[in-house]
Image (cartoon, grey):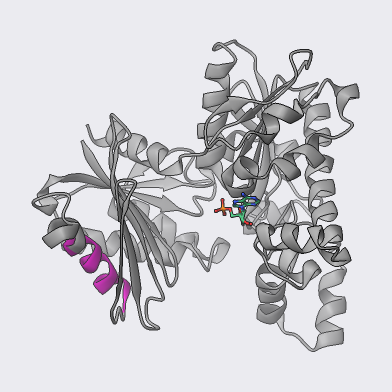
Amino acid sequence: MLIFVLNAGSSSLKYQLIHAQTAEVKASGLVERIGIDGILKHEIGENKKITFECPIPTHKEAINLILHTLTHAETKVIDSIKEIKAIGHRVAHGGEYFDKSVIVTPSVLRKMEELVPLAPLHNPANILGMQICQNLMPNTPNVAVFDTAFHQTMPEVHFLFPVPHEDYTEHYLRKYGFHGTSHYYVSQQAIKLLGNKRNTKIIVCHLGNGSSICAVKDGKSLNTTMGLTPLGGLMMGTRSGDIDAGVIPYLMDKKGMDTHQIIDYLNKKSGMLGVSGISSDLREIISAASEGDQRAQVTIDMMCNRIRKYLCAYSGLLGGADAICFTAGIGENSNLIREQVCANLEFMGIELDKEKNNLLLPLTREINKKSSKTKIFIIPTNEEFVIAQDTYNLIK
Ligand code: AMP
């Protein structure tokens, strides 16, 4: 069954047309700069890549353009949009309402509207994507897959913030966690690699532009590093991650920033970009460090230290780990970061095999020494496949 997977952002749309049973991706792509000028990057299979530049004033034109591209001329992969049996939407925030994926109904849309204050940058775009699809394909069901849903199993002791309790009961202030679809997929793959053993203790390190770590006990999220918003936890490409809350009024005062400006600063100008002064792209920072740039080296060391802090904390929380999994752009591709993260953790039963770690293979594999008590896996994430499967399971 063909599922159209859509990830709608404020000025961009990522999509895949995917076969839910076989995971075959018929086409995928990205529309960027919606409302500015407009660019569509479309991929068919492994080799065919096409780029169109044309005015794309709103998300409606963007989705129309994608559907046209899928069904016309040399970019065609299906004869008609009727071949699309359902649309799976990636949704940033499901609050406490949604602990699993759901078919989109008017009441689901109303609840998502209520959640906008918790995800003001992401949820409005997700809602818009759903409304446009309902308009353009009125007979095709839409499914919402929430990035927070997997973490709804976290116990109170891990999701509450140490502030007056009424902030939780009245204002829903708590840790929600994100990257849930990825943490779910990767931990499920790890459980399979562990021979489907029961009572598993797994730590998933999703390290990309956005990064988070999740402690997964018996297949369920026990704790994770992101918080009320995706700004919490690890140091990321442009996000600071955890900082002393006192930094915020201090910087606002010193730099004359308002609330919007300080949040923008911590989300878009901090993290690896802010510390290195070079880039948010780790490859450029590694390259600068190898040429002797001290700040670039400090950036790498800071990022790895913070990953190690949580790795050790979650290992303690779980009482040791059966497996540590690395995933996403950095986790899957950077042998240097994996080596630095795992260094000197033999006392915890974590022993990396450097030769296996250094092989450049984009495949699921084990990179620990035989003697290592904890397995170390590289598992490429596949969020789109989870979205397609959830969508299929709900509508079939
Ligand atoms: P993602 O958000 O999952 O696409 O990950 C993006 C991040 O992965 C960027 O910081 C990239 O620099 C990083 N990345 C991708 N490939 C490599 C690589 N071969 N070595 C180091 N970092 C990489």
Residue 61 is drawn in which quadrant? bottom left
Above or below: residue 148 compared with residue 300: above
Q: Is residue 67 magenta?
A: yes
Where residue 76 sits: x, y (%)? 16, 55
Q: Is residue 312 magenta?
A: no
Which residues, given as a range, are shown in magenta?
58-68
Above or below: residue 226 compared with residue 205: below
Left or right: 248 as drawn, with respect to 126: right
Where residue 226 sits: x, y (%)? 67, 50
For the N terminus, the quadrant is: top left
Where residue 334 sits: x, y (%)? 67, 45
Looking at this view, name the residue that lies furthest to the front.
Answer: 291
Majority SS type along the magenta span: helix
Q: Nearer the viewer, residue 203 or 335?
A: 335
Residue 201 is drawn in which quadrant? top right
For the C terminus, the quadrant is: top left
